[in-house]
Amino acid sequence: MTRLFLVLMICLGGSGLLHTAVQAQSTSAPPAHERVAVPEPSEKALSYHHSGNILWMVSNLWSMVVPLAFLWTGLSGRIRDVAQRIGRRRFFVIGIYVIIFSAIGFVLDLPLSYYAGYVREHAYGLSNQTFGKWFGDAVKGLLVGICFGVAFLWLPFALLRRSPHRWWLYVGLLMVPFLLFVSLISPIWIDPLFNKFGPMKNKTLEANILALADRAGIQGSRVFEVAKSVDTKALNAYVTGFGDTKRIVLWDTIIAALDERELLVVMGHEMGHYVLGHVWRMVAFFSLLIMATLYAIYRTAGWVIGRYRSRFGFEELSDVAALPLILLLFNAYLFLISPVIMGFTRYHEHEADRFGLEITRDNHAAATAFVKLQQENLAVPRPGWLYTMWRASHPPVGDRIDFSNDYRPWERNQPLVYESLFRK
């Protein structure tokens, strides 16, 4: 279920990560039109980029190999049989199946996850995390996934049984309240499981961020500082939640690495996601996308089951043993439509960049922040159209530096796209 979980996190997220270890710079203003150059990628960055492409291909293949193994060996059917002997009632059978299936999948994924999330990040100097913390977070993620699976997975299977020809439509519609529910509880119940959230230590910076939020029309927010330096050298800042759970979050790494002007541009970008309603758009988009993907599964799963039912050990998609088949087909279709997903998220990131520039009008600070992103995140500024189309949820960093340098409508007496949203 890793890929589905990733889709949900893309939907509910909206912030980029900046891996850096640089020190804060002077806050004195540079010349108004000083252009920031796009640095050439280092040899280390090119190596990280190429190994990342290989890892991406292996991860996509692995996401299909694992559920196929559950199906082809008949393991999924045997897990279902065990769950039926223990649980008897359908709700408990599905819950027990989810627990066993998730635990086995976690063990199978562990070597690749360990290499990708721990070994490789340490090898390139991008992580501070101890093995104990990494493994503890991985187990917490597993438990969170199990809790959600046990609590909610019974509903799609109930719809599969009651409405075998329309279940995909109803599940897609239910994704809207489900994603909104997750976005509501995540800041309060899920995020603090992995890191410590506390008040901002720099009260002057906090006041300036709140002033910027007020100008962006975001009122009633609280600012939190996350002790993330125990895990990573990455930078992150975001606006999350809604209603009473709305909050502005900065990792301690970004506070240490960027000067105040750069931080305010980054926060302007993140506030743009909130003000422009990107979370709501993401919820709608991914709900429709999941609905379309489930329809494709509905149209193809019957043929697959009819051909291989004796090997799989089940005859209907409503059988909980069919979960690996659903995941296999979901992963395959999701891979095919990845360019659509990436293009959609890149558009929103570009518009958030525009919002951040318009509300701060600090082109130089935006460009230097992206330069630090490129250099310390070991990024390649012009990765090529194929990489951008299939893998990039954000515009290439070279394009973002160029845009930060060039976008100055206020200097040409041209209207700003989002000026009507700013409070005077």
Image: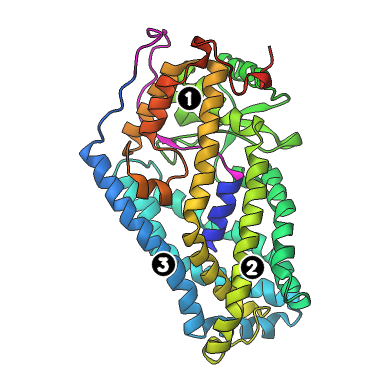
Residue at the spot of label 3? 62
Label 1 vs label 2: CA separation? Answer: 45 Å
Between disc 1 and disc 2, the foreground one is: 2
Residue at the spot of label 2? 295
Q: Residue furthest right?
A: 162
Number of the label disc, if any, that sits on residue 255: 1
Q: Is residue 320 shown left or right of residue 115?
A: right
Label 2 vs label 3: CA separation? Answer: 24 Å
* Type of colouring: rainbow
What residue is drawn where x is 52% and y is 85%? 74
Q: Earlier in the sequence, mark 2 or mark 3?
A: 3
Q: Is residue 347 above or below residue 263?
A: below
Q: Residue furthest bottom?
A: 310
The quadrant holding residue 97 is bottom right
Asked whether 261 falls inside the magenta stretch, the response is: no
Between disc 3 and disc 1, the foreground one is: 3
Q: Nearer the viewer, residue 336 or 157?
A: 336
Q: Is residue 133 shown left or right of residue 387?
A: right
Label 3 amino acid?
Trp
* Position of residue 274 measured from the top left corner of the image (x, y, whole percent): 64, 33
Q: Is residue 232 shown left or right of residue 87?
A: left
- Near mark 2 (Cα within 10 A), the count class, few <14, some 14-19 or many ≥20, is some
Give the SS element for disc 3.
Answer: helix
Magenta stretch prevailing secondary structure: loop
Which residues lie in the magenta part? 12-35
* Position of residue 401 measured from the top left corner of the image (x, y, whole percent): 39, 27
Label 3 vs label 1: CA separation? Answer: 37 Å
Give the SS element for disc 2.
Answer: helix
Q: Earlier in the sequence, mark 1 or mark 2?
A: 1
